[in-house]
Amino acid sequence: MNAPLHAADRPSAAPALAGAAAQASSVRHIALVGPLPPPSGGMANQALQLSGLLREAGIAVDFVQTNAPYRPAWAGKLRGVRALFRIVPYMAALWRAAGRAQVFHVMANSGWSWHLFAAPAIWIAHLRGTPVVVNYRGGEAANFLKQAAAWMRPSLRRCAALAVPTGFLAHVFGQHGIGTVIVPNIVNLERFSASAAPRTPGGLRLLVARNLEDIYDNASALRAFALVRESYPDAQLTVAGSGPLRADLEQLARELGLAQAVHFTGRVDTAGMPDLYRNADIMLNPSLIDNTPNSVLEALASGTLVVSTNVGGVPYVAEDGKTALLVPPADPAAMAQAVLRLAGDPALAAALREAGRASVAQYAWSSVKPRLLDVYRQALASKGGRRP
């Protein structure tokens, strides 16, 4: 049985870069298991982006979608049994893909997502002799592992590698004696880049780019914005995201007297996000739980200042006082104070903006590609290896 790669097994940057061409030639067919937009969540966007980049690199990709539409569509209305209309085709797709691909790349998350989608993919690939790379994401990993580590271990022992995007998740898994290899998220630095064009005139512009769910605490961002408006009455806030709390948040905006200053865009696809970042002065990330928020990385790449809560993996991708300002969660006053500090200190804002843009170079595909291909190469060389 194959154990996940431990620290001593992690590839160094130099060999990975030197051997990238050889690795690419040995990895020709990947099965990528994960969600696709919509909705445009972090994992779905990463999966979509990765599949395209691998194909551009000459690697065939079979995409097994974990959130495929119900077929027939009316099955989605059958509560209690509709899961069968998704799970059964999913299992069949996994079996077919495992018979073709050299390596399974499984995008995994916490909770039922692990049990229903990740674990079956691992076991089906194992039964067919296809090595598995699990790419684990999600800010709730610490709580999930406390409850489910014992259930996860048999599956993880059948993986050639457990890849995580930051040292935060490496630390979380390490607390349970589970080794990992770090493969960063991918940021399209051509799409998300600072604009050379002058910004149109206007007051202070803030942006929140998280879905409207409890864990992202958009309510605190609204309350922080109300405090900012006391000093900058012309300030505007754009809330870009969809979710079940939209009506509640719109009601809160009215109660705070912000109805005319807050614009709820609804869901914005990846192609529409660069303009939102470039037109904002400061992006707020008010989340209560987080891992590697792509919105923070994309904002930094776009030259947008970031004020974020200091939860989970955020301090691993944004350094307080150097690339962003970090504040405690659920503290609107602290968030507002950080915004006012940036608005009132152009020198600090310029320094953070420049350092933030430089910090995201490590997330470019040119940097991530050799590391990922080296993980694939090691998976092929594992006991599970390439099937005859």
Image: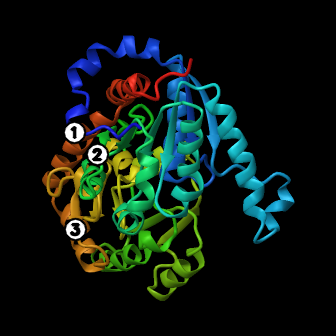
Sequence-wise first label, 2 or 1? 1
Front position among marks 3 and 2: 2
Q: Which residue is mark 1?
A: 7
Point out the image quarter for the C terminus: top right
Distance from the alpha carbon under mark 3 to that under mark 2: 37 Å
Point out the image quarter for the N terminus: top left
Q: Position of residue 200 (x, y in %)?
A: 41, 50
Instruction: Locate residue 335: give its quadrant.
Output: bottom left
Residue 200 shows up from this direction: no
Residue at the location (49% across, 80% down)? 253
Distance from the alpha carbon under mark 1 to that under mark 3: 37 Å
Residue at the location (30% across, 53% down)? 169
Sequence-wise first label, 3 or 2? 2
Does 99 appear above or below 139? above
Instruction: Locate residue 188: give its quadrant.
Output: top left
Look at the numbered discs 1 and 3 and tell me whether their residues touch, using CB distance below 8 Å: no
Q: Which residue is mark 3?
A: 338
Which secondary structure lies at badge 2?
A: loop
Q: Amino acid at mark 2?
A: Gly
Q: Which residue is mark 2?
A: 179
Sequence-wise first label, 1 or 3? 1
Residue 239 shows up from this direction: yes
| Residue nearer the viewer, 153 or 347 | 153
Q: Position of residue 196 (x, y in %)?
A: 35, 35
Which secondary structure lies at badge 3?
A: helix
